[in-house]
Image (spheres, rainbow, N blue to C red):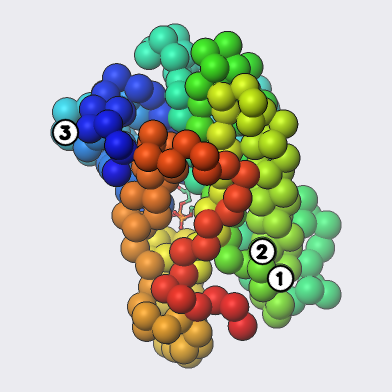
Amino acid sequence: MPKTSDYFHGKTIIITGAASGIGRATAQIFAREGANVVCADINEAGLRDTSAAVNAAGSQALALKTDVTSRAQVADMVQRAIDAFGSVQFLFNSAGAAIRRAKFLEIDDALMQKTFDLNVNGTFYAMQAVLPHMLKSGLGVIVNMASMAHRRGGPGSSVHYAAAKGAVVSMTMGVAREYAAAGIRALSISPGPIETPFQAAAQSSPELVQRFLEDIPMKRFGRPEEIGELVLFMCSDACPFMTADTVYVNGGGGWR
Ligand SMILES: NC(=O)c1ccc[n+]([C@@H]2O[C@H](COP(=O)([O-])OP(=O)(O)OC[C@H]3O[C@@H](n4cnc5c(N)ncnc54)[C@H](O)[C@@H]3O)[C@@H](O)[C@H]2O)c1
């Protein structure tokens, strides 16, 4: 929660990957706090649902169909957000995916490239597009979605994804430290398994679910709202000394 109760009123967040899962849950949480929410995603139907939920909460949504792997579309997303709401204080880069599972020797160039285009370049483009604007106002918080996978390396199924999320953690740290004295904070979040469509494939295999759960002392998956509330805390005025780091959210597990 913010230290100041109306802290988010009239402020604006851009959320990529807002059509589903963690992005959608975060959009609803910021709407609850009175923020304007710019919802960006490639999934138009999902965007419509998220925007409707934001508007139903009494906040204002702006839905923007955006492919974060396109620098031009991401620049347009930021410009349209500024045109609509006048300023942007927060950016949450949630768009991301492992694309598909593959053993290390089966990762081909196309899979590696796609994984980095989405998870790394998408985050890179959005940060570069929004930072000049945040620097002008001297206030901005960027939250990037990493993953517990970057600590484990993704052996057996997702080294490509783990490596991309490792790049997100490093890039976030670099941006945070480069602009720390200019009023900008940047943080990343490294969750274990969270119940979203991202995990649907894993959940269709009872053995895989069992393997995940054995590794989580709380014996359950996380919920998207639990990540959304953390994004809210990070963006708030509750702990402005916090920047650069990644925060692990995994029910006590995920280290094997
Ligand atoms: N769910 C988990 O267990 C988990 C764990 C760790 C990290 N993460 C990360 O959290 C983030 C959110 O994942 P989620 O679980 O909410 O998954 P999700 O699949 O529910 O949501 C991801 C969203 O990203 C969007 N997207 C995909 N490609 C895009 C593109 N090129 N441009 C714009 N949007 C695009 C999708 O349409 C979707 O709406 C991802 O970065 C993911 O890697 C998820």
Q: Residue at x 57, y 42 (%)?
A: 243
Quadrant in the picture for the C terminus: bottom right
Mark 3 vs mark 2: which is more N-terminal? Answer: 3
The amino acid type, in three-letter code, at marker 2 is: His
Quadrant in the picture for the N terminus: top left
Q: Residue at x 72, y 31 (%)?
A: 178
Whether tag 2 and tag 1 are in contact, CB under 8 A, the answer is yes
Mark 1 vs mark 3: which is more N-terminal? Answer: 3
Residue 150's label in the rendered image is 2
What residue does disc 1 label?
Answer: 153
| Mark 1 residue crowding within 10 angstroms, few (<14) / some (14–19) / many (20+) | some
The amino acid type, in three-letter code, at marker 3 is: Ala
Residue 56's label in the rendered image is 3
Q: Residue at x 37, y 40 (%)?
A: 238
Looking at the rendering, which quadrant does residue 173 occupy?
top right
Q: Secondary structure at mark 3?
A: helix
Q: Secondary structure at mark 2?
A: helix
The amino acid type, in three-letter code, at marker 1 is: Gly
Left or right: where 51 falls relative to 75: left
User: Looking at the image, which is closer to me, 154 or 40?
Assistant: 154
